[in-house]
Image (tube, grey):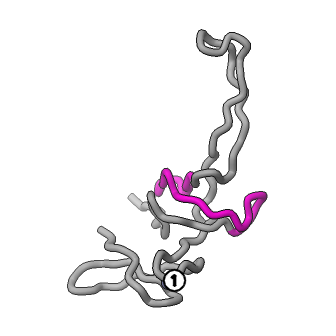
Amino acid sequence: MSLVKLNVKKGDTVVVLSGKDKGKQGKVVTAMPKKGKVIVEGVNKVKRHTKPNVKAPQGGILVKEAPLHACKVMLVCPACNKPTRVGHKEVNGKNVRVCKKCGEVIDETK
Ligand SMILES: [Zn+2]
């Protein structure tokens, strides 16, 4: 089974690289490695019309974030606060993610 390796994961702060939300920053709320997509808080919002139901007899408009391709976002390094590519290396026998800009270890990966 081949999993797409995402460079970002849940809880990461990312910046959007393209599209209508270009330049926006937000937190990854859902990572979908199988689809290569992420959902970012406050980014790529879409309106969905909902059918009338008990709670909303008139129907309604639901605004929610739609998934976007992980390649369209870049991690914002928690250490230097800049958008960066993510590097991987081994430190003390553990795989970690590192910031390509400042070299700081971001976190461990499994
Ligand atoms: Zn950094």
Residue 85, relative to residue 14: is it above or below? below
Identify the image quadrant of residue 73: bottom right
Q: Residue at x 38, y 58 (%)?
A: 1
Q: Which residues are magenta?
A: 17-39
**Which image quarter holds the C terminus?**
bottom left
Residue 35, percent from left and from top: 53, 53
Instruction: Locate residue 83: give its quadrant.
Output: bottom right
Rate crowding at label 1 as few (under 14), some (14 to 19) or many (20 or more) other CA atoms within 10 Å.
few
- Front residue of 7 and 34: 7
- Above/below status of 18 relative to 92: above
Q: Is residue 25 above or below residue 95?
A: above
- Residue 88 placement (x, y as % from top left): 40, 81
**What's the residue at 64%, 46% (across, down)?**
66
Q: Is label 1 in a helix, a strand or a loop? A: loop
Q: Residue furthest left?
A: 93
Q: Is residue 18 above or below residue 39?
A: below
Tell me which amino acid carries mark 1: Cys
Q: Nearer the viewer, residue 107 or 86?
A: 107
State the count of labels. Answer: 1
Q: Position of residue 93 (x, y in %)?
A: 21, 83
Residue that numbered label 1 is attached to: 80
Q: Is residue 16 magenta?
A: no
Is residue 28 inside the magenta stretch?
yes
User: Which residue shows up at 59% across the image and 60% down it?
Assistant: 26
Q: Nearer the viewer, residue 52 or 56?
A: 56
Does residue 84 appear left or right of residue 34 in this picture?
right
Direction from residue 46 to residue 38 in the image, left or right: left
Respond yes or no on whether mark 1 lies under 8 Å from ligand 1: yes
The answer to whether residue 2 is left or right of residue 20 is: left
Name the residue furthest bottom: 102
Q: Residue furthest right?
A: 20
